[in-house]
Image (cartoon, rainbow, N blue to C red):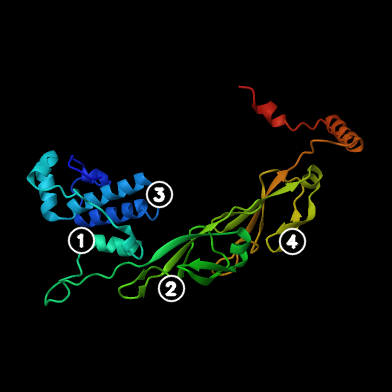
Amino acid sequence: MAGGGYRDYFKVLELERGADADAVKKAFRRLARQYHPDVNPGDASAEARFKEISEAYEVLSDPEKRQRYEQFGQYWNQAGAAPGAGFDVDFGRYGNFDDFINDLLGRFGGPAGFGMGGFPGAGSTPSPNLDASANLKVSFAEAFRGCERSLQVNQEKVQVRIPAGVRTGSRLRLKGKGNLQPSSGRRGDLYLNIQLDNHPVWELEGDLMRADLPLSPEEAILGGELIVPTPDGEALITVPAGINSGRSLRLKGKGWPLRQGRGDLLLTIQVQIPSELNPEEKRIYEQLRQLRQSLKLNPRDQLVANGVL
């Protein structure tokens, strides 16, 4: 965004008026990363927004320009040259995004390397943050058992060991695999943000693994021993007679890998009513209904007794 009109540079940087220099710098870094042309290739509106953000930072990071801007408001351009006039960026001359950001911070009111570190009593240039981050999706099975992944990082093939028990939000650090500062040869670290794919059966809830356990009506009524699948393979469980849907059975130590040991596995009962019956099944259920009616067993007795106001 170039040219002479009035712009609310605080709004451009999504700041309240009176924000201090540190807040201005943080806002610029955040928004510049979001709208940088390298992150939005071919997006003209993102590039225009990026230049607008850079122009706002140029003014608000310079104490003299900021004072004039705050003093004269919409007429501040008449009190001095417009800082955005002719503003341009040659993105191709930077090795990576952090090189660009640190150069821009130096030019627009941040600590400049040239002419400062070589004189007694002068300030020194802070080391740029060369760390980088990336998202890494892993399957439920990979996260449960742990695995190795081969990644391409800055044209380098890297083997990554993913430990068992990672979950969405976990971060893995690859030391010395971040951005490169060409002038010094320094490399930052690369942080991998783990994103766990959903699984059709298992669900992770904190340290608990959960799943539904379908039962037939006779299994729920009579109970007994059942063989059920777990992430480790099959397990033998005991189902109490007369169990209803919504009840849960806890299998201790059969859940998600933790730093020490394993979490629990919770199986929630879901009684499955058959939608179709063969003639023999239908005959048996009909006999059961007649028997319960003859015994005057009504599952709605409580509703009848307490439902009348």
First of labels 3, 4 by sequence position: 3
User: Marks 2 and 1: which is nearer the front?
Assistant: 1
Distance (Cα) linking label 4 and label 2: 41 Å
Residue type marked 4: Ala
* Disc sitting over residue 235 in the figure: 4
Residue type marked 1: Arg
Dot 4 and dot 2 residues touching (CB under 8 Å):
no
Q: The C terminus appears in which quarter of the rendering?
A: top right
First of labels 1, 3 by sequence position: 3
Instruction: Tell whether 148 sits left or right of 156.
Output: right
Residue depicted at 30% across the width and 73% down the height: 183
User: Marks 2 and 3: which is nearer the front?
Assistant: 3
First of labels 2, 3 by sequence position: 3
User: Marks 3 and 4: which is nearer the front?
Assistant: 3
Distance (Cα) linking label 1 and label 4: 66 Å
Where disc 2 sits, the SS reads: loop
Residue type marked 2: Lys
Distance (Cα) linking label 2 and label 3: 32 Å
Instruction: Tell whether 161 sits left or right of 119.
Output: right
Distance (Cα) linking label 1 and label 3: 26 Å
Residue hosting label 1: 107
First of labels 2, 1 by sequence position: 1
Residue 24 at what x, y percent from top left? 23, 53
First of labels 1, 4 by sequence position: 1
Residue hosting label 3: 42
Residue density around tag 3, few if under 14, some if 14–19, many if 20 or more, within 10 Å? few
Residue hosting label 2: 175
Residue density around tag 4, few if under 14, some if 14–19, many if 20 or more, within 10 Å? few
Distance (Cα) linking label 3 and label 4: 55 Å
